[in-house]
Image (tube, rainbow, N blue to C red):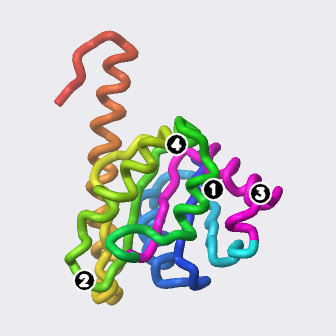
């Protein structure tokens, strides 16, 4: 069974950013057996900048995930300091073996490249594999969230299928189909 983590870097608990991230995970994993853990960092602000056992446990569980969605509202064209503080706990390659999806929410389209340009490179530096460009969700589309997240999930599924075919071919020593 796949282990999935959804890490929310919004300082407001139970945020709309959380709803968007969970919708993406739900659409992506609709027919796949999985265990999902939601980590709402707003519930851990007291420990965010300390070396508590609680935070160590959270970082270890995320690092042991097969897939992690890292979501944040857009602040100054990038992700929140709360998410940055959480990710700073990892050493280089601390997320090796984790497939990570960067997701930012925002009020306007000006920062649509933010998840790809700002958050994805940090996740790659930490050793995660990113299966395509990051997802940017316009908060004005909340009434279309399921539709928008299904489209994003479909693209990630296609990318992951292509990577799986390539990986299988490389392991088998045969050319990949497609």
Q: CA distance from mark 3 to mark 2?
A: 36 Å
Which mark is nearer the camera, 1 or 2?
2
Question: Callout 3: helix, strand or loop?
Answer: loop
Residue at numbered disc 4: 98
Q: Residue at x 46, y 45 (%)?
A: 99
Q: Which comes before the other along the chain, label 3 or label 4? A: 3
Q: List x then y, in percent, for residue 23.
A: 44, 72
* Residue 77 lies in the magenta stretch: no
Q: Residues within 10 Å of mark 3 (few under 14, many from 20)?
A: few
Q: Secondary structure at mark 1?
A: strand
Between the C-alphas of marks 1 and 2, the distance is 33 Å
| Residues drawn in magenta | 47-74
Picture residue at 50% right of the left edge, 42% below the top? 126
Residue behind mark 1: 35
160 left or right of 108 in image: right
Q: Local crowd at mark 2 within 10 Å, few (<14), some, or many (≥20)?
A: few
Residue at the image position 24 percent from the left and 69 percent from the top: 112
Where is mark 3, residue-wise? Answer: 51
Given contact means CB atoms under 8 Å apart, are the residues at marks 4 and 2 in contact?
Answer: no
Circle 2 — which element?
Answer: loop
**Which residue sits at x=52%, y=42%?**
98
Q: Residues within 10 Å of mark 1 (few under 14, many from 20)?
A: few
Identify whether 60 is placed above or below 162: below
- Residue 36 position within the rendered picture, expressed as x and y whole percent measured from the top left: 61, 60
Residue 127: x and y in percent read 48, 38
Q: Which of the two discs, 4 and 2, labels the residue nearer the N terminus? A: 4
Q: Can residue 67 be found in the magenta stretch?
A: yes
Q: Is residue 28 left or right of residue 110?
A: right
């Amino acid at each position: 069974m796949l282990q999935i983590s959804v890490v929310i870097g919004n300082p407001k608990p139970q945020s709309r950013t959380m709803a968007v991230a969970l919708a993406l995970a739900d659409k992506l994993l609709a027919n796949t057996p999985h265990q999902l853990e939601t980590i709402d960092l707003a519930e851990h602000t007291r420990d965010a900048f300390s070396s508590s056992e609680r935070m160590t446990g959270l970082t270890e569980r995320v690092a042991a995930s097969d897939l992690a969605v890292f979501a944040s509202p857009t602040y100054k064209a990038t992700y929140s300091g709360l998410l940055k503080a959480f990710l700073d706990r990892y050493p280089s390659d601390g997320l090796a073996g984790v497939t990570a999806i960067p997701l930012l929410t925002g009020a306007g389209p000006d920062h649509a490249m933010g998840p790809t340009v700002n958050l994805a490179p940090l996740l790659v530096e930490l050793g995660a594999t990113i299966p395509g460009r990051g997802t940017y969700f316009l908060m004005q589309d909340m009434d279309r969230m399921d539709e928008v997240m299904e489209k994003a999930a479909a693209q990630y599924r296609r990318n992951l299928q292509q990577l799986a075919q390539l990986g299988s071919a490389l392991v088998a020593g045969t050319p990949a189909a497609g």
